[in-house]
């Protein structure tokens, strides 16, 4: 799950930087930030050294995602909005939500902690990448995105509560996350903003 998430999110982050016309160094930094920031935050919350600092393989996987994004730019005019990138983003979201849920469970945190860490692992990298791109993290004001990770984390917790554990619970978490994200992209789901809510009777 972690491997899939690293490659997918590095690709997505790099595609965003390409759209903003960053140079190759900037593209690499944004791609790696999106791949690693969420996982590093997760690891710090459970008091362990981030995996990115333990193994060069982790960095190599991130660089693979960056290279894939640059390769897509050679053949596509707008790689950040292409279905390949959108599907990669959904897969990365699901992979990191699942990884976060597993790590949090192994660390012995509460059910709320499992959902919170799953969500942070899934969306933290994207939020940090948006800051590097000089814009507000999009998870705070548009799209049905972080909610997908929350639903995935809840699925993992519920599965464990009813006696479903291990790889089956992980698969359910990933399936719910990726399915809801792809459905949100397909049907344009969004959470309502406060300004769209009206008092009763109006």
Image (cartoon, grey):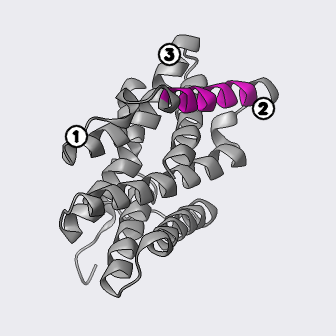
- Other-residue count near label 2 (Cα within 10 Å), few / some / many at <14 / 14–19 / ≥20: few
Work out whether 172 lies above or below 126.
below
SS majority, magenta: helix
x then y, percent, for residue 140: 33, 49
Q: Judge whether residue 65 is colored magenta.
A: yes
x then y, percent, for residue 155: 40, 75
> Which residue sits furthest bottom?
162
> Is there any visible trace of residue 194 in the rendered image?
no
Judged from the image, the secondary structure of the residue bearing numbered disc 3 is: helix
> Which residue sits furthest right?
75
- Which residues fall within the magenta stretch? 59-73
Quadrant of the rendering where the C terminus is positioned: bottom left
- Residue at the location (41% across, 35% down)? 36
Q: Quadrant of residue 159?
A: bottom left
Label 2: which residue?
Answer: 76
Task: Report the side of 186 relative to 36 (left or right).
Answer: right
Q: Nearer the viewer, residue 23 or 71?
A: 71
Judged from the image, the secondary structure of the residue bearing numbered disc 2 is: loop
Label 3: which residue?
Answer: 26
Label 1: which residue?
Answer: 44
Work out whether 16 lies above or below 42.
above
Of circles 1 and 3, the one toward us is 1
Q: Nearer the viewer, residue 22 or 40?
A: 40
- Other-residue count near label 3 (Cα within 10 Å), few / some / many at <14 / 14–19 / ≥20: some
- Residue at the location (29% across, 46% down)? 42
Marks 1/2: CA–CA distance: 38 Å
Work out whether 101 lies above or below 61.
below
x then y, percent, for residue 22: 54, 16
- Residue at the location (39% across, 31% down)? 52
First-in-chain label (1 vs 3) = 3
């Amino acid at each position: 799950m972690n491997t899939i998430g690293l490659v997918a999110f590095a690709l997505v982050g790099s595609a965003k930087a390409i759209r903003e016309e960053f140079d190759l160094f900037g593209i690499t930094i944004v791609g790696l930030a999106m791949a690693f920031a969420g996982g590093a935050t997760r690891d710090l919350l459970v008091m362990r050294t981030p995996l990115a600092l333990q193994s060069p393989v982790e960095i190599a996987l991130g660089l693979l995602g960056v290279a894939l994004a640059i390769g897509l730019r050679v053949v596509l005019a707008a790689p950040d909005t292409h279905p390949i990138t959108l599907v990669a983003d959904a897969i990365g979201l699901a992979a990191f939500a699942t990884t976060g849920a597993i790590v949090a469970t192994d660390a012995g945190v509460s059910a709320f902690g499992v959902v919170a860490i799953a969500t942070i692992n899934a969306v933290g990298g994207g939020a940090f990448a948006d800051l590097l791109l000089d814009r507000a993290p999009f998870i705070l004001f548009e799209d049905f995105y972080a909610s997908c990770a929350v639903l995935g984390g809840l699925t993992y917790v519920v599965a464990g509560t009813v006696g479903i554990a291990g790889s089956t619970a992980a698969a359910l978490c990933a399936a719910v996350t990726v399915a809801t994200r792809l459905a949100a992209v397909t049907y344009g789901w969004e959470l309502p903003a406060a300004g769209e809510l009206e008092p009763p009777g109006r």
